[in-house]
Image (tube, rainbow, N blue to C red):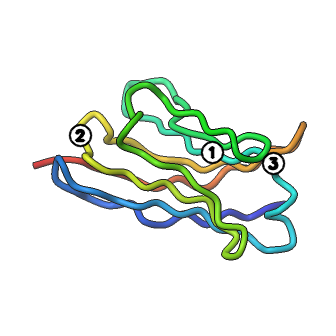
Amino acid sequence: QVHLVESGGGLVQPGGSLRLSCATSESVFSFFNVVGWYRQAPGKERELVANIDNPDSTNYADSVKGRFTISRDNAKNTVDLQMNSLKPDDTAVYYCVLARGVYNYWGQGTQVTVSS
């Protein structure tokens, strides 16, 4: 199996910033042509936040456009999500995903809480 390690979650005030990272081993990272971040808030459906597809086409949820930036660092074997101008509605558990064809792997999830 592929093991993903997420980091960077925490508590931040509205208007603040946070950077999430998702790391795996160098032996498998380059295999995945689609990488992304999902989130799930209490009482809400899991939703796509952002992804990178084959290999440089990006997609963002309308709610985060202009505020979040997704990137992949092939040297560090990480998928990152820079989150700026955070709002209380961004509060959720965030999950990274790496995929290629029928293969897809998920991180353990990291809590992001935006509150004053």
- Depth check, mark 2 against mark 3: the one in front is 3
In the displayed structure, does residue 73 sit left or right of residue 116? Answer: right
Per the image, the residue denoted by label 3 is 33
Compared with residue 49, is residue 27 higher up or lower down, i.e. above or below?
below
Q: CA distance from mark 1 to mark 3?
A: 10 Å
Amino acid on which the number 3 mark rests in the picture:
Asn
Percent x, y for residue 10? 32, 61
Characterize the local packing of mark 1: few (<14), some (14-19) or many (20 or more) Cα atoms within 10 angstroms: many
As measured in the structure, the alpha-carbon distance from the residue carrying label 2 to the one carrying label 3 is 30 Å
Kindly state the secondary structure of the residue where label 1 is placed.
Answer: strand
- Determine whether label 2 and label 3 are within 8 Å by CB: no
Left or right of residue 13: residue 3: right
Give the residue number, with chain letter if any, for mark 1: 36
- Image position, residue 8 (x, y; %): 42, 65
Q: Nearer the viewer, residue 110 or 84?
A: 84
Q: Reply above or below: 110 against 58.
A: below
Q: Is residue 29 above or below residue 67?
A: below
Residue of label 2: 87
Residue at left 61%, top 59%? 79
Residue at position x 85%, y 44% in the image:
100
Q: Nearer the viewer, residue 37 or 113?
A: 37
Q: Secondary structure at mark 3?
A: loop
